[in-house]
Image (cartoon, rainbow, N blue to C red):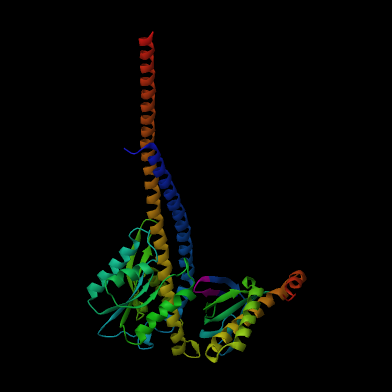
């Protein structure tokens, strides 16, 4: 017996299907949810959410929101969410560098926003790299192309 | 009577106009579809958010959060008017502004406005209405990040007591030919008395599957405090997408009429042009014939 998982953001539904396990970034720590979990509503932090179905794992980057848990189903209401496959690593990398740069030069009042942006890009990168590692064939070609610094 | 050349020039310019309106029509048609798809995509989140609100017991207790609290008596209202940035869309902008003004007149209370779209703002401005915030230049199918500022402006006005009720004036997309201006209450949120049919259905099937004991992290009030503004944002977002679909549908119909008129005009003018051209030819032939005749007579006289 699995869990029916739905992941939605205000703009779209990202995922809907049966899974065996959900691990979500709860505001008070990481939450592992198996079927027959007690009813729970909690806020989500920014972070990585992953699901397991048999041997297959799926990763999502979640930037805040809620999770609503019932014994047989789980609904994730994310403020912003992306599937690992959708994340553009190079773009996230550029965003991270830009944020780091800004953090060094920005006046203190802008620092908070920059820190948020930095966190987001870090989470994106983390989630996106998980997807890379799981690939059956190593992606040396891609990495070889991305590596040289311009 | 215009000469053939003048008529030809007019035909050419009308033909060009027709091409422009045809292109605008095609663009509008594709944007209608996009806006509709985006509206549909928000339903899943709306449903899930409702479920959370209902489970939090918000439906029962309105003192739980300021966004749920009804104020009696209502002394002033805020209207969020969603209109378009541009014209060339038939009576779309006029209809929504007229509906909004009728509503305000019926309520008979001091009113302030938040306008979305230049056309609505300009019309209200000319009447000397009190506009507290103005948003325009939204992309054709905006993301929620682009509209959340609008929702927060409304929430601030409400929470700081400058408005006791907040309404949304938007245009519902019924189909390509029919768009209906409607007024919807945004704040205070009243989950139980929503007019929206889809929402009413959600509430019913959620009640049936009610679970009593919940764990809340950190606690119910905090969660409510974040979910309610989110939900308000979502309602504004849905209203804007719906209005976008309506605007593009109205523009598509207006542009199709313009294209049809242009081709009818081209047909008429082509007839005129042919007549004028034939007239010119006939006149020339008469001239030549007359000249030949005169020449023949002169020759005969000399012989």
Residue B299 versus residue B280 in the image, above or below: above
Residue B207 in view here = yes
User: Is residue B93 shown left or right of residue A139?
Assistant: left
Q: Quick one: quadrant of the C terminus of chain A? A: bottom right
- Depth check: give the residue in front, B277 or A6: B277
User: Is residue A20 shown left or right of residue B162?
Assistant: right
The furthest residue to the top: B303
B147 is within the stretch colored magenta? no
How far across and down, in percent of the image, does residue B157 sit? 35, 83
Q: In the image, what residue occupies the spot 64% across and 71% down? A: A85
**Number of numbered markers:** 0
Res B152 quadrant in image: bottom left
Q: In the image, what residue occupies the spot 50% across and 91% down? A: B218
How far across and down, in percent of the image, does residue B282 sit? 37, 26
How far across and down, in percent of the image, does residue A29 sit? 59, 89
| Magenta segment | A6-12
- Depth check: give the residue in front, A69 or B19: B19
- Depth check: give the residue in front, B4 or A75: B4
User: Is residue B224 shown left or right of residue A36?
Assistant: left
Q: Main secondary structure of the magenta part?
A: strand
- Depth check: give the residue in front, B248 or A100: A100
Q: In the image, what residue occupies the spot 42% across and 52% down? A: B21
Residue B175 in view here = no
Q: In the image, what residue occupies the spot 43% across and 44% down? A: B12
How far across and down, in percent of the image, does residue B131 sit? 32, 77
Residue B255 versus residue A149 in the image, above or below: above
Res B109 quadrant in image: bottom left
Q: Quick one: quadrant of the N terminus of chain A? A: bottom right
């Amino acid at each position: 017996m699995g869990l029916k998982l739905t992941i939605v953001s205000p703009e779209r539904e990202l995922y809907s299907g049966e899974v065996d396990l959900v691990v979500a970034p709860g505001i008070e720590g990481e939450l592992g949810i198996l079927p027959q979990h007690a009813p729970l509503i909690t806020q989500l932090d920014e972070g990585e959410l992953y699901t397991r179905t048999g041997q297959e794992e799926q990763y999502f980057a979640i930037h805040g929101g809620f999770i609503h848990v019932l014994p047989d189903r789980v609904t994730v209401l994310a403020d912003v969410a992306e599937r690992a496959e959708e994340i553009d690593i190079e773009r996230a990398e550029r965003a991270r560098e830009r944020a780091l740069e800004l953090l060094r030069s920005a006046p203190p009042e802008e620092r908070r926003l920059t820190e948020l942006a930095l966190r987001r890009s870090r989470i994106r990168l983390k989630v996106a790299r998980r997807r890379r590692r799981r690939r059956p064939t190593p992606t040396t070609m891609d990495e070889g192309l991305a590596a040289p610094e311009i | 009577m215009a000469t053939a050349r003048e008529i030809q020039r007019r035909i050419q310019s009308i033909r060009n106009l027709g091409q422009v309106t045809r292109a605008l029509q095609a663009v509008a048609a594709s944007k209608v579809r996009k806006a509709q798809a985006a509206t549909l995509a928000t339903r899943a989140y709306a449903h899930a958010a409702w479920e959370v609100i209902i489970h939090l017991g918000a439906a029962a207790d309105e003192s739980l959060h300021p966004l749920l609290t009804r104020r009696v008596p209502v002394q002033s209202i805020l209207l969020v008017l969603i209109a378009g940035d541009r014209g060339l869309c038939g009576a779309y902008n006029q209809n929504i502004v007229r509906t909004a003004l009728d509503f305000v007149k019926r309520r008979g209370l001091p009113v302030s406005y938040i306008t979305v779209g230049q056309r609505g703002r300009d019309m209200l401005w000319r009447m000397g209405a009190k506009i507290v915030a103005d948003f325009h230049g939204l992309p054709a199918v905006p993301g929620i990040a682009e509209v959340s500022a609008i929702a927060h402006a409304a929430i601030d006005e409400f929470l700081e007591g400058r408005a006791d009720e907040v309404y949304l004036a938007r245009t519902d997309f019924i189909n390509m030919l029919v768009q209906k201006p409607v007024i919807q209450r945004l704040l205070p949120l009243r989950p139980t008395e929503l007019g929206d049919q889809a929402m009413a259905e959600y509430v019913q099937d959620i009640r049936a599957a009610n679970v009593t004991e919940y764990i809340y992290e950190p606690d119910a009030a905090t969660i409510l405090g974040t979910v309610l503004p989110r939900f308000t944002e979502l309602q504004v977002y849905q209203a804007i997408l719906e209005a976008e679909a309506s605007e593009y549908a109205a523009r598509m119909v207006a542009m199709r009429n313009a294209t049809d008129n242009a081709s009818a005009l081209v047909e008429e003018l082509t007839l005129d042009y042919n007549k004028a051209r034939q007239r010119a030819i006939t006149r020339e032939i008469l001239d030549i014939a007359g000249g030949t005749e005169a020449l023949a007579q002169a020759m005969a006289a000399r012989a």
